[in-house]
Image: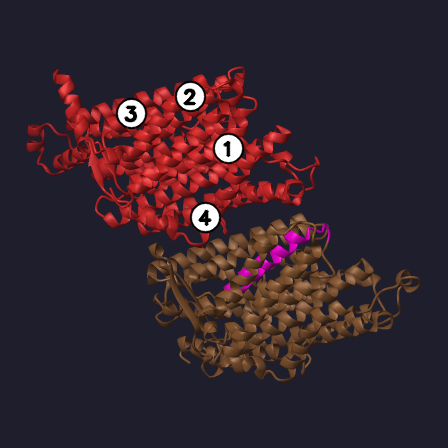
Chain colours: A brown, B red
């Protein structure tokens, strides 16, 4: 398995886009063949990903492994530098897994207006962009992958989306583009200060002394990543994009693309600009808690189930950002755990919302009801995922939030403990609100009586075999990560310690 | 007898290998002109394969010179990596324009043979310009590029718009030539040289001498009004050719009125010819008096980018849109001139390199966009952007290719246009001309609006007319090759940057 060391990451990253090229060469009408080819390429990437996970040396998870560093654009000293450590491994694996599951889901449902070939090609292109983001160790390479996801997602929303798709697609595109321009300026500024685009070299020798310049650059990176996360008040594209996107688009957006922002903070902004990270720590913490409470309150007001899940993401990503802001090993470990958990749970919830829409042709919470009676298995899955989302101990959602709150009790990096304890209380209130709106939603959707509209004569199918196939890995992982959190924390901890080295331990 | 002897001596002193590409192209042009006389009307199209073969052989001759450095005609004509790269670019433009023109001229417009002859002559001007290192050679080259252009623009004799376009182009062209020639004659009068290296040396001598000694040798100071005036005249003359604001008025009308393939040629070959002339003059003759003219270019670049983009926002006719977008693109290239620093060879070589990268990539993406517009107009006969609605559902391949060219022009991944902008951007930051970098960044955002508006129209809006747009084989090949080249250059930019990077005079 020597080849995994040098080619594993590249293969996992580029097999999907190779699949997209193959798809383009196939005839338009052959839906079955197109789906098969798409699934095979995505599956191959997943297999390579599993081999990478197996090959990874967990004892040295703090170090970059499976590293490749080749010349790429010598004129600007950008290199093809990729590698993986304990922070990126879970996200790398998650993006390959979720993309593959989306491919399976596509077998029985391609949204209107069809066009299987284009739809699958775009998902494969998206997969390459997402996976590449998590393995890139060169700022320019990272930027390219970060941007590559923009175009396919724009089309996925704009062509296959709901009724307000054009508005949502353009809003998504402009917000993200706006953020990335400042991010690119930040990268260039780092380059001219440290004369390198290499994230690891820059991490080991942060090029900037603390001061105004570092703070300005941090703000640039912050804008790029915060829009992607999205942090309050940059979140307004998210409810529209999530609601209008087709099911797999929402799943990929929620499960993986949002993590690109938080990952950017952990991988780039914090280690390379540590002083600015400490300087802005309180601001980020406060914004995070605002997002937690604001997201939860908005959820109470939603009538559309998909939009509700979208707003719940704002809150959950708030916990992730709070964990990062604490600058403690608990907080950051919790943040990475939270990213993975949110990816699994919210991905699952969007799958369910999509399938529900396809069954009932509505997502209005008021119009639904009695799901546990009518389609008991589907209803049970909804209850399971929603309860995981509210952070029930024993399921994945719990640990991320718990660790983030725990971390804010005693923040690191010289941050003010008093402020963060207040933030902790705010976050605690957020968890209660989260439990509140999710249980209320379950009460309205899963319980109660079946509405007359769907009661008689409507054959609403329960969970289909293909849906089981696409969903069971997520369901199992939600439980596994909840019962045995070391599954994620065991991988991340070493790497988090390395990261915290920059903040005086 | 004396003259004959001189001629013979000159003939034997010419380095025929160095001038081989130009000679081959000259012969091709003559052969095409003569062959056209003897071809029957229905086989006049043979002029096109004949021209293409000639350009291919020219390209072979260019490649055979790779890596060499030769000087001939007493220093007026030089082969170096700069010249070779640009000759290559001109040959590729020639081949693409032939592919775009074929179906257009075969059906509809008469004067096929004449058109190909004129185009080859104009292209020859570009080849000569790449090697010209002497005022007179530069002048001949720019005339050789322009004069056939006037005639080509008016080829649609019975169309009033075509006539108007040709007349406008002619009047502006002649005026600018006159101004340029006046500037050149002044420079010759002051320095006593037509060779660019001689002019540079004379200006340096003038700079380093004491006032008394200067008046003794009769050479002016760099800041001397006469030098300022003559350099300014030359810049104004070229500014017309490259349609820089405020000398751009002719371009949109001329492009719209001219046969569309001619517009494609004018906006690439003819414009690039002007840029090459400017590069040669500014970097080899006048770099030491850069203090005089650098601000002029900073103003020109800012005005050209901003005005071009702002007016492009309001265009509804695709050729006019491309004309204004081409003006804005000229602005980005002009930025590189505003970076020149007599004291810093590193900054200068980076500026030159980024200009060459931009020019090469611009040629391919702009021709691609023109090809797509021409392909679209073949069926509907319309150039209005509104009619592009839903093109994706009618002709997915054409829509995707055009979207690719638009993304590239906008400077977005995954197309090479992203590197073109980034390199100029980096050069500006490296030269510490930050404000131009900011202006450029702001303009890139404005430009994204109108480029992406076309993409949105094609992909997200429903079609008003049904039925695919049939694209002839040659047009398809040209567009496919251009898109592929842009994509490959995006993945691995060194294929251009190494060629451009080695370019020194």
Q: Residues within 10 Å of mark 3 (few under 14, many from 20)?
A: some
**Cα distance between the residues tagged 1 and 3:** 27 Å
Classify mark 4: helix, strand or loop.
loop
Q: Residue at x 46, y 72 (%)?
A: A3
* Pointer 2 and pointer 4 on the same chain: yes
**Cα distance between the residues tagged 1 and 2:** 21 Å
Q: Earlier in the sequence, mark 1 or mark 3?
A: 1
Q: Residues within 10 Å of mark 1 (few under 14, many from 20)?
A: many
Q: Residues within 10 Å of mark 4 (few under 14, many from 20)?
A: many
Instruction: Decide if residue A504 is on the left or right side of residue B320.
Output: left
**Cα distance between the residues tagged 2 and 3:** 26 Å
Give the magenta part as a residue range.
A112-132
Q: In front: B339, or B326?
A: B326
Residue B100, numbered circle: 1
Q: Position of residue B154 (x, y in %)?
A: 47, 19
Q: What residue is pinned by disc 3?
A: B140
Q: Earlier in the sequence, mark 1 or mark 2?
A: 2
Quadrant of residue A185 within the rendered picture? bottom left
Q: Earlier in the sequence, mark 2 or mark 3?
A: 2
Outermost residue toward the right in this view = A456
Q: Position of residue B121 (x, y in %)?
A: 37, 25
Q: What residue is pinned by disc 2?
A: B35
Classify mark 1: helix, strand or loop.
helix
Quadrant of residue A63 within the rendered picture? bottom left
Q: Chain of mark 1?
A: B
Q: Residues within 10 Å of mark 2 (few under 14, many from 20)?
A: some
Q: Earlier in the sequence, mark 1 or mark 4?
A: 1
């Amino acid at each position: 398995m020597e080849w995994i060391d040098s080619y594993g990451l590249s293969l996992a990253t580029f097999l999907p886009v190779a699949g997209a090229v193959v798809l383009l060469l196939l005839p338009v009408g052959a839906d079955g063949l197109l789906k098969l080819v798409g699934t095979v390429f995505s599956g191959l990437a997943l297999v390579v990903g599993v081999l990478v996970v197996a090959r990874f040396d967990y004892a040295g998870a703090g170090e970059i492994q499976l590293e490749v560093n080749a010349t790429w654009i010598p004129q600007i000293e950008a290199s093809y530098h990729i590698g993986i450590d304990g922070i990126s491994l879970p996200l790398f694996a998650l993006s390959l897994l979720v993309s593959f599951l989306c491919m399976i889901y596509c077998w029985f449902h391609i949204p209107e207006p069809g066009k299987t070939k284009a739809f699958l090609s775009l998902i494969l292109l998206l997969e390459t962009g997402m996976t590449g983001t998590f393995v890139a160790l060169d700022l320019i390479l990272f930027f390219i992958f970060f941007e590559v996801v923009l175009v396919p997602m724009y089309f996925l929303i704009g062509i296959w989306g709901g009724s307000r798709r054009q508005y949502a697609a353009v809003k998504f595109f402009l917000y993200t583009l706006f953020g990335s321009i400042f991010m690119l300026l930040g990268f260039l500024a780092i380059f001219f200060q440290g004369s390198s685009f290499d994230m690891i070299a820059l991490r080991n020798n942060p090029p900037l002394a603390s001061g105004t310049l570092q703070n300005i650059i941090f703000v640039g990176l912050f804008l790029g990543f915060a829009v992607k996360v999205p942090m309050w008040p940059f979140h307004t594209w998210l409810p529209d994009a999530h609601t209008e996107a087709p099911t797999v688009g929402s799943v990929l957006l929620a499960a993986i693309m949002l993590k690109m922002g938080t990952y950017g903070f952990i991988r780039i902004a914090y280690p390379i600009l540590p002083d600015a990270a400490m300087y802005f720590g309180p601001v980020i913490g406060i914004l995070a808690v605002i997002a937690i409470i604001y997201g939860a309150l908005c959820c109470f007001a939603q009538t559309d189930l998909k939009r509700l899940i979208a707003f719940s993401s704002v809150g959950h990503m708030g916990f992730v950002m709070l964990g990062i802001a604490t600058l403690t090993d608990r907080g950051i470990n919790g943040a990475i755990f939270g990213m993975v958990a949110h990816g699994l749970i919210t991905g699952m919830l969007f799958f369910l919302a999509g399938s529900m829409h396809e069954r009932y042709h509505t997502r209005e919470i008021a119009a639904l009801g009695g799901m546990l009676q009518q389609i008991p298995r589907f209803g049970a899955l909804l209850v399971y995922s929603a309860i995981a989302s509210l952070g029930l101990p024993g399921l994945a959602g719990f640990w991320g939030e718990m660790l983030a709150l725990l971390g804010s009790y005693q923040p690191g990096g010289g941050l003010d403990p008093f402020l963060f304890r207040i933030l902790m209380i705010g976050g605690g209130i957020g968890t209660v609100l989260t439990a509140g709106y999710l249980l209320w939603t379950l009460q309205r959707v899963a319980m109660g009586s079946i509405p007359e509209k769907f009661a008689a004569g409507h054959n609403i199918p329960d969970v289909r075999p293909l849906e089981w196939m696409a969903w069971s890995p997520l369901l199992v992982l939600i439980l596994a990560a909840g019962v045995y959190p070391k599954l994620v924390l065991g991988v991340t901890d070493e790497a988090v310690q390395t990261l915290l080295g920059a903040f005086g331990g | 007898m004396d003259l004959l002897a001189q001629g013979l001596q000159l003939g034997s002193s010419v380095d025929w290998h160095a001038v081989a590409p130009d000679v081959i192209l000259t012969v091709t042009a003559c052969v095409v002109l003569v062959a056209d006389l003897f071809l029957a009307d229905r086989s006049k199209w043979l002029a096109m394969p004949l021209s293409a073969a000639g350009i291919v052989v020219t390209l072979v001759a260019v490649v055979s010179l790779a890596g060499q450095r030769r000087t001939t005609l007493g220093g007026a004509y030089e082969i170096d990596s700069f010249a070779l790269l640009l000759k290559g670019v001109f040959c590729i433009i020639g081949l693409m324009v032939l592919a775009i023109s074929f179906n257009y001229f075969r059906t509809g417009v008469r004067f096929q043979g004449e058109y190909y002859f004129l185009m080859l002559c104009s292209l020859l001007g570009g080849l000569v310009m790449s090697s010209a290192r002497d005022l007179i050679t530069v002048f001949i080259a720019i005339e050789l590029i322009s004069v056939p252009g006037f005639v080509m623009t008016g080829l649609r004799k019975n169309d009033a718009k075509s006539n108007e376009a040709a007349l406008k182009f002619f009047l502006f062209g002649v005026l600018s030539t006159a101004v340029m020639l006046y500037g050149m004659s002044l420079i010759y009068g002051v320095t006593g040289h037509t060779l660019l290296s001689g002019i540079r040396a004379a200006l340096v001598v003038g700079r380093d001498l004491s006032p008394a000694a200067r008046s003794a040798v009769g050479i002016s100071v760099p800041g001397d009004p006469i030098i300022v005036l003559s350099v300014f005249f030359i810049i104004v003359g070229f500014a017309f050719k490259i349609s820089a604001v405020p000398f751009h008025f002719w371009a949109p009308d001329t492009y719209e009125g001219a046969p569309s393939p001619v517009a494609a040629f004018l906006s690439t070959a003819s414009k690039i010819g002007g840029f090459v002339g400017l590069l040669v003059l500014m970097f080899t003759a006048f770099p030491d008096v850069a203090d005089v003219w650098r601000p002029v270019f900073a103003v020109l670049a800012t005005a050209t980018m901003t005005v071009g983009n702002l007016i492009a926002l309001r265009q509804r006719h695709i050729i006019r849109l491309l004309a204004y977008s081409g003006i804005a693109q000229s602005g980005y290239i002009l930025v590189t001139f505003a970076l020149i620093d007599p004291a810093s060879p590193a900054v200068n070589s980076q500026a030159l390199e980024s200009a060459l990268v931009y020019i090469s990539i611009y040629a391919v993406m702009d021709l691609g966009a023109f090809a797509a517009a021409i392909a679209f107009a073949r069926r509907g006969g319309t150039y209005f952007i509104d009619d592009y609605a839903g093109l994706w559902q009618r002709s997915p391949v054409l829509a995707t290719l055009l979207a690719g060219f638009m993304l590239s022009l906008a400077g977005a991944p995954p197309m090479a246009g992203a590197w073109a902008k980034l390199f100029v951007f980096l050069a500006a930051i490296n030269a510490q001309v930050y404000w131009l970098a900011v202006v450029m960044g702001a303009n890139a955002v404005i430009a994204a609006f109108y480029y992406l508006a076309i993409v949105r129209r094609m992909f997200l809006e429903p079609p008003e007319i049904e039925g695919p747009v049939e694209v002839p084989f040659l047009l398809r090949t040209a567009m496919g090759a251009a898109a592929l080249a842009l994509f490959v250059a995006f993945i691995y930019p060194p294929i251009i940057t190494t060629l451009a990077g080695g370019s020194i005079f």
